[in-house]
Amino acid sequence: MPQETTLIGTVVAGLGVAFLMGALAHRIKISPIAGYLLAGVMVGPFTPGFVADTGLALQLAEIGVILLMFGVGLHFSLKDLLSVRRIAVPGAIAQIAVATALGMMLGLYLGWSVEGSAVFGLALSVASTVVLLRALQSLDMVETEKGRIAVGWLIVEDLVMVLALVLLPAMFGSRGDEGGTAGLLQSAAIVLLKVVAFVAFMFVVARRVLPWVLHWVAHSGSRELFRLAVLAIALGVAFGAAVIFDVSLALGAFFAGMILGETQLSRRAAEETLPLRDAFAVLFFVSVGMLFDPKVLVEQPGPVLATVAIIVVGKSVAAYALVRAFGHKSGTALTVSVSLAQIGEFSFILAGLGVGLKVLPETGRDLILAGSLLSILFNPILFSLAVKRMKAEEEVQEPDMEAAAHEASNAGVVLIGYGRVGSHIGHLICGRGDGLMVIEDQKDMAAAARDAGATVIVGDATKESILRQAGIDTATTLLIAIPEGVEAGAIVRRARAINPKLVIVARAHSDEEVDDLVRRGADHVVMAERETASRMAERAMLKRA
């Protein structure tokens, strides 16, 4: 392939084959992630046919990690982060220690040096950002207590890995031989100072500048400029954090998102980054598959199984025991343990650094890659089993949820979404003293709906369980105020199946959306442009009359 078309070829091959294999995986009812990983193997250097550029794929995947962590930061406040510090900090450090010890035992058994075994174990101890967050997002758990603990745990792991990446060259590189213990302590002190300086900068300077910039752009009225500003902030802060403060790109993006999450524009910023975030996240899984050499499964089946067992079983058991020891419920412990039962991007970086320093044998890197791919394949299965277990535990409703269910049976109107349109609807209905049940997935919007007098369920309205919890089977009217046509169509279809007599009113932005919503069962569809034109024409005719 000509050098000038390498990037295009990598993107086209990665996304194209990922689409085909993801669609096949979806068809046979397994996680699309499995299809994306297999697509990476197919376009990688270890299988015949087209070979994409692995280096470029990894860099593109890093953009996905940045955007994903930025999106999580938008919904994750400093209060949320501090609320889980008592379990996330000691829990993550203890879990890293256990996983590292297990990895060292395997490395020593295979005849490696103590140093190489330690690097191997450390690489097995850290979970993948992308896999963990995609799993939590798919189950709407990022903003729950379980999700906050898992994300906080991930942030602590991230900081530990940043420290490790700086200390390893100091310990095993040429300069480490000269500096000894004093040089090592100096390197550690410098890393800690840089992390503290980064956090201070974000909360003292960026907390004032970034929201001001975003509000200024929003008031310009240009959606294109706003989208560009969001991407520039996410990528720019992440890159600047890595270059200036030596923290990870993911950590920089998370803090940027958390700063902007305190503004009223956080929801819009999240929506603007969503398409790119999903596309580049797919490239991450493709890049993992490209690094995998299938021969390792045949040549070293025993070490591969042992590596996977440490990742999937050893880490999970340790995390579960730690969370339970801190007094949390088994459902929370199960969520955290399953979330961490995989490895990803930091593991690859550590493995590459270890091999480059001639500490870790190349066999160790092959085992890490094999363990990553197999653990990522197993992770969706483990999550589905964990969800079934948690559903059984949560059958006994909490008092507030029982109250919500009781209110739902008395509310004749169910409103989906409490944004710009939904909030106006809510004020009109609640202002008349009528009962209203609101389904909203954003905490700030849900709080506003409660303040207006509505009963609120926080969750994803496209899920049948949430609709039933809101009392859709006994409601008389469903108002769908969200702007996303695809999600609205799914809600209409499910609501109509639950309650055939329900009167459904939805909003749309195009003739195609109107037709689709009507076809799926909506009784009335309001298109903003038509209604605006109609009202303006009425005003004009009244003026002439």
Image: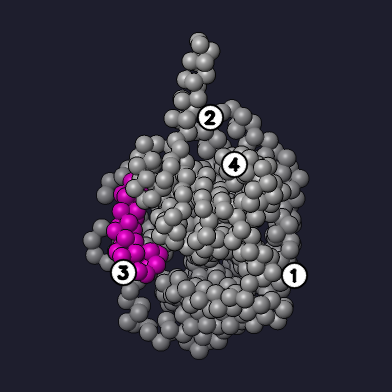
Task: Name the N-terminal-most of marks 1 and 3.
Answer: 3
- In front of the other: 180 or 446: 446
Task: Name the N-terminal-most of marks 1 and 4.
Answer: 1
Task: Name the N-terminal-most of marks 4 and 2.
Answer: 2
Q: Main secondary structure of the magenta part?
A: helix
- The residue identified by callout 4 is 425
Q: Nearer the viewer, mark 3 or mark 4?
A: 4
In the image, what residue occupies the spot 34% across and 53% down?
15
Give the residue type at disc 3. Ile
* Residue 409 makes an appearance in the image: yes
Give the residue type at disc 2. Ser
Compared to residue 372, the image places residue 511 above or below, namely: above
Dividing the picture into quadrants, the one containing residue 327 is bottom right
- The residue identified by callout 2 is 222
- The residue identified by callout 3 is 28
Query: Mark 4 Cα within 10 Å, few/some/many (few <14, many 20+)?
Result: some
Tell me the number on the disc at residue 86: 1
Compared to residue 25, the image places residue 526 above or below, namely: above
Query: Mark 3 Cα within 10 Å, few/some/many (few <14, many 20+)?
Result: few
Q: x, y (%) of residue 110?
A: 47, 87
Give the residue type at disc 4. Ile
